[in-house]
Amino acid sequence: MSQTFSVSKVMEDYLVTIVRLEEEYGVARVTDIANELGVKLGTVTNTLSRLKVQGYIEHIPYRGVRLTEEGRRIALRVLRRHRLAERLLTDLLGVETHKVHEIAHRLEHDIADIEDYLERKLGDVRTCPHGKPIPPKEYRIEGIPLSEAKTGERYCIVKVIIDSDEVFEEIKKKGIKPGSFLIVKSEELDGGMKIKVDSKEILVSEKLLSAIIVHKVE
C-alpha cells in the first residue's frame, strides 16, 4: 500500500534549496545546503534522512544529494511561486530588486490560492527579476534525451543523469543545469550537438546527450 506524506514548510525550504543548488552546480552538497539554510550539519543530515525515506531525494555517493521526480515536482512548484512573488513585488508594488528575495521567501508557501490570478496580472513573464527562469505551472516528468531533440526547437532541461565523474565534470564545466532553457542550433559531424543556453552557445558531446533529459517548450 502506498503512503502519502505531507510536506511541511521546512521540508519545502530544503527541497527548494536543493533545486537551486542543482541549478548552480548540478548536485547539492550537504555543506552547501547547511550554508544556504543557516543550520547545523547535524540538522541537515537528519532532515535529509526524512526526505529520503519519503522519496523526495536520493543520495549520490561522494557528491551529495539530488531530487527525485516527485521531490523536483514539489520544489519547482514552490520555486515558481517564489519567482512570481518576486515579480509581484518589483513589477506591481515597486519594491527594489535587492529586497525582494527575502520577502518572496515569506510569501512562497502561502500564495498557492492566488497563483493563477497573479500570473494573469503579471502577463507573459518568463524570468524572475534576477533573470532566473520561472518554472512552468505543470512540471513534466516525461522527457526525452537531448540526442532526440530537433534543431531549432526550444527545450527545458528536466534533469541530468550523473552516472560518472566524466559526466559530472562536463556538465559542471559547461554550466548545464536542470531548469535551464536551451535551443538546439545544429547537430555535429562527430555525433555531438551545438546548443544555445541563455545567450551562450556550447558544444555537447555525444556521450553527454543521452544524460541530459529535456522536454519541449511550446
Image: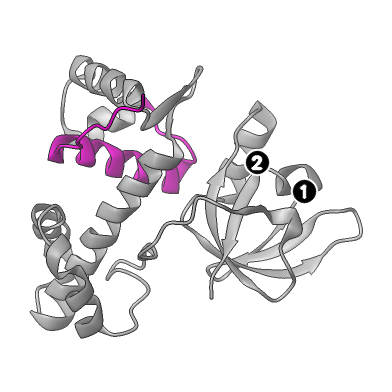
Secondary structure of residue under mark 1:
loop
Secondary structure of residue under mark 2:
helix
Left or right of residue 2: residue 203: right
Left or right of residue 1: residue 204: right
Residue kind at label 2, given as amino acid type: Glu
Which residue is disc 2 drawn over? 170
Residue 48, image x, y percentages? 29, 23
Identify the colour scheme used: one colour
Q: Residue furthest right?
A: 189
Q: Residue at x 42, y 57 (%)?
A: 139
Residue 163, image x, y percentages? 64, 29
Left or right of residue 35: residue 183: right
Residue 90, compared with residue 136, is above or below; it is below
State the extent of the magenta-drawn residues as a range: 1-29
Residue 17, image x, y percentages? 29, 41
Closer to the chain start, of discs 1 and 2, is 2
Q: Residue at x 69, y 32 (%)?
A: 166
Q: Residue at x 29, y 31 (%)?
A: 33
Residue 57, image x, y percentages? 39, 30
Q: How many marks?
A: 2
Residue 210 in magenta stretch? no
Residue kind at label 1, given as amino acid type: Ser
Say if residue 204 shows up in the picture.
Answer: yes
The quadrant where residue 196 appears: bottom right
Residue 9 in magenta stretch? yes
Asked whether 76 or 88 is in front, the reply is: 76
Which residue is disc 1 drawn over? 205
Q: Kindly indicate whether the residue at mark 2 contacts the one at mark 1 (C-beta within 8 angstroms).
A: yes
Asked whether 82 or 137 is in front, the reply is: 137
Q: CA distance from mark 1 to mark 2?
A: 9 Å
Residue 15, compared with residue 187, is above or below; it is above
